[in-house]
Amino acid sequence: MKPGILNHPDFRRLWTADLLSQLGSRLAMSAAPLLAVITLNASTLQVSVLRTCETAAWLVLGLFAGAWVDRIRCLPVLIWSDLGRAVLYGSIPVAAWFGVLTLTQLYVVLALSGLLTVLFDVAHSSYPPRLLEPDQLLPGNARLAANHSVAAVIGAGAGGFLVQWLTAAVTLGLNALSFVWSALWLRSIRTPEPRPAPAERPNLRREIGDGLRYVFRHPLLRPIALTTTSTFLFQSASGAVMIVFLVREVHLSPSTIGLLSMIGLLGALAASWFTERLSTRLGEPRALVLACVGIGVAFLLQALTGPGWRLTWYVVSVLLAAISIIVCYILQSSIRQRLCPPELQGRVSATMSFVAWGVAPVGSLLGGLIATATSLRTTLWLSGAGALLGAGFVVFSPLRTLHQIPEPAAASGS
């Protein structure tokens, strides 16, 4: 990683705020299903609906958010999204305190916070090119991507311990505080963000179509989008049942689940350190292909998890997934930001997120239905196989033969 990116004071503030916001989201992802399973006695299908509520907003708002963000400043969107999520998650411990917390309230909180997460994520992925120079994007994205993986692992680990120590409802209240702290850091950014030039005749449908066409006509972005879609579909199916599987079949406590999940922190830290070196050695496109295959292998290995020594398979899969996901995220973000013209950053970012997160609620529901009809382990096997097969879109694409990403004029599919 190029030294000095954290010496950029406003990027450092963005990086800190992002870490706090990501940590809050990940605490919710681990604490919410534990609250449903342990406190509210939810079924496997009901837990999978929780995951569906978390990600359904991408189907409703994903593409519109991209067109909207291209018209406005990103920073206010980031701040207000954090504050809104703080209010929503803060309602959970209050309801628990008065003894009126229900599964319905949990569904509503996750669905509404999902809408704000869409706005936050789209604005966040469009903001670095407005804050950094082009040669700072790769190290900047590496730092931000590390936040995703580190927060995922720490959130899972800390979430398990906090749920056992403080209860799941109180843990979700701490999540609300993390969003407030993130908003305060974002508010301290001083670099002026110019307002994008307004379109002469705004046409939301046409603007959304521009983003979709750019991605799916582009010979490099299209296979990335298709692999990401497949990966998220089957990853969501696996994630929807994993907590239930570990609690009810492997018989683990929340704290043990958290401890084992934190093993992935080693992979996250390693990946954030060596991604630039890997991309220099293999080239960004081939390094991305390798990472996509690694994600599929990691989720396939999860199905081997069992009591006793077979927990080793879970540890290995978490470690490999953390490494592969962080490498994939860094390289995808940098490739997209370099290939995409400035005026399309928000829409292309939203399109890439939409094709990924848009299938996540479908995958979550699918995982719950398959587990109900067959078994939890069968769901994990099918999910892992699907994620590995989905890597074929990038394996059999021009990315496999390239060493460097061409200039936009040479690679553009528009």
Image: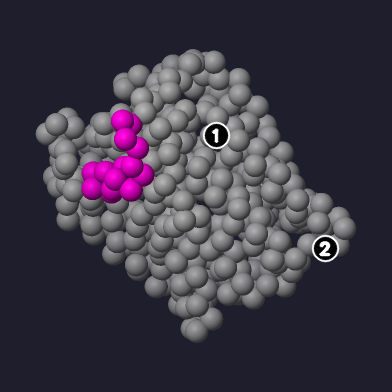
- Residue 410 position, x and y percent, is 12, 34
Query: Where the N terminus falls, by quadrant?
Result: top left
Q: Residue 298: where, in percent of width, then height? A: 41, 58
Expressed as whole percent of the image width and height from the top left, the position of residue 179 reads 65, 38
Residue furthest to the front in view is: 201
Q: Is residue 63 above or below residue 73?
A: below
Observer able to see residue 282: yes
* Camera sees residue 256: no
Within the magenta stretch, is there residue 205?
A: yes
Frontmost residue, 207 versus 297: 207
- The structure residue drawn at horizontal position 23% and vertical position 59%, both measured from the top left corner, is 392
Q: Residue at x 16, y 38 (%)?
A: 412
Label 2 amino acid? Val
184 w.r.t. 322: above or below: above
Q: Which residues are magenta?
A: 199-214
Earlier sequence position, callout 2 versus callout 1: 1
Seen from the viewer's position, the closer of residues 246 and 121 is: 121
Q: Is residue 92 left or right of residue 133?
A: right
Residue, disc 2: 100
Q: Height in image: 167 above or below 21?
A: below
Q: Please tell me the numbered disc located at residue 1.
A: none
Q: For mark 2, give the secondary structure.
A: loop
- Which residue is found at the position 60% from the left and 35% from the top? 80
The magenta stretch spans residue 103: no
Name the residue tied to disc 1.
78
Residue 357 sits in quarter: bottom left
Q: Nearer the viewer, residue 103 or 204?
A: 204
- The extreme right residue here reads 98
51 is higher (above) or lower (below) than 10: below
Considering the whole magenta stretch, tell me its main secondary structure: helix
